[in-house]
Amino acid sequence: MSQVRILIIEDTPDVRAFIKACLEEDYSILEAENGVKGWELAVNELPDLIITDVMMPQMDGNEFCRNLKQDERTSHIPVIMLTAKAAEDQLIEGLESGADIYLTKPFSILVLQNYISNLLKLKTVLRQRYSQKIYLEPLDVEVGTVDKKFMERLMSIIEDNLGRPDFSVPSLAKELGMSKAVLYKKFNALVHIPIGEFIKNMRLKKAASLLVNDSMNISEIAWEVGFNDRKYFSKEFRKFFGKSPSEYLAERGGKIS
């Protein structure tokens, strides 16, 4: 699991060093000594999981977590919150801020390791499930509100630009107000499909719909969804649907043009 990156935000150097020492054999570790620096790292690096203390200077763990979960760039990242205070109202505040796990100090490192493992496994399961469902019911998926709104906005932008052959990942990133690197990481965290392939597949699904519901011929449909080469369009269509556009249309009782 060396590719999995965990951000540790903890203002006590000894505690931060201890957690790092316990995890660095299995994970790549990023460190921050307060919430402000942690926030900068979270946005720029998009780690796979974050462990944060609650009581910190400049920005405490609850504020950090709220910022993280409300920002569409980072809302998908699971958070384990550490605290020395176990009062019920503080536990509720931590969970309401969006923390996935609330762990009271002193804690067992084995418990922490198991929480990390379980959160990462759950993240993988949800990502695979989301990838399977997204083409069937793209707006009815099991993700958080911020992530769902992000995907709705992303898919709406793609849909509006399907006819542009030059529309690509950089174009989408610009429309979303994100860097390409952040978009790649964010999308990859949610969906088990490369973003460039996802755009192409949306073009092909739109083409399939036009084939059976529109009077345009195959060349016109290819152009309508952003392919300016009919041979390449047919090749990609067959790769995605397992049949050529003509075969797909004939199966559904349409006329081939």
Image (cartoon, helix red, strand yellow):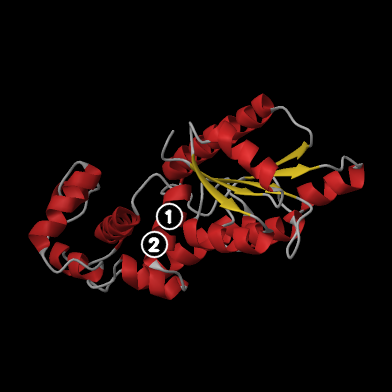
Q: Callout 1, which amino acid?
A: Lys
Q: Are marks 2 and 1 in contact (CB under 8 Å)?
A: yes
- Residue at disc 2, secondary structure: helix
Residue 119 image-quadrant placement = top right
- Give residue 253's mark: none
Residue at left offset 21%, top offset 54%: 254
> Given the current orientation, which residue lies at the most extreme left position?
231
Q: Callout 2, which amino acid?
A: Ala
Residue at left offset 87%, top offset 48%: 90
Residue 219 image-quadrant placement = bottom left
Compute the Cα span from label 2 to label 1: 6 Å
Q: Identify the residue under disc 2.
A: 181
Q: Where is residue 184 in the image (x, y as percent from the top left)?
A: 39, 57
Q: In this view, does 164 lie above or below 232?
A: below
Q: Position of residue 156 (x, y in %)?
A: 45, 67
Q: Where is residue 43 in the image (x, y as percent from the top left)?
A: 53, 62
**From this viewpoint, is residue 73 visible?**
no
> Given the current orientation, which residue lies at the most extreme top position?
110
Dot 1 surroundings within 10 Å: few (below 14), some, or many (20 or more)?
A: some
> Given the current orientation, which residue lies at the most extreme front position?
14
Count of marks placed on residues: 2
Specify whether 130 is left or right of 117. left
- Give residue 185's mark: 1
Which quarter shows the N terminus?
Answer: top left
Specify whether 223 is left or right of 143. left
Residue at left offset 69%, top offset 55%: 65
Query: Is residue 188 or residue 215 the one in the foreground?
Result: 188
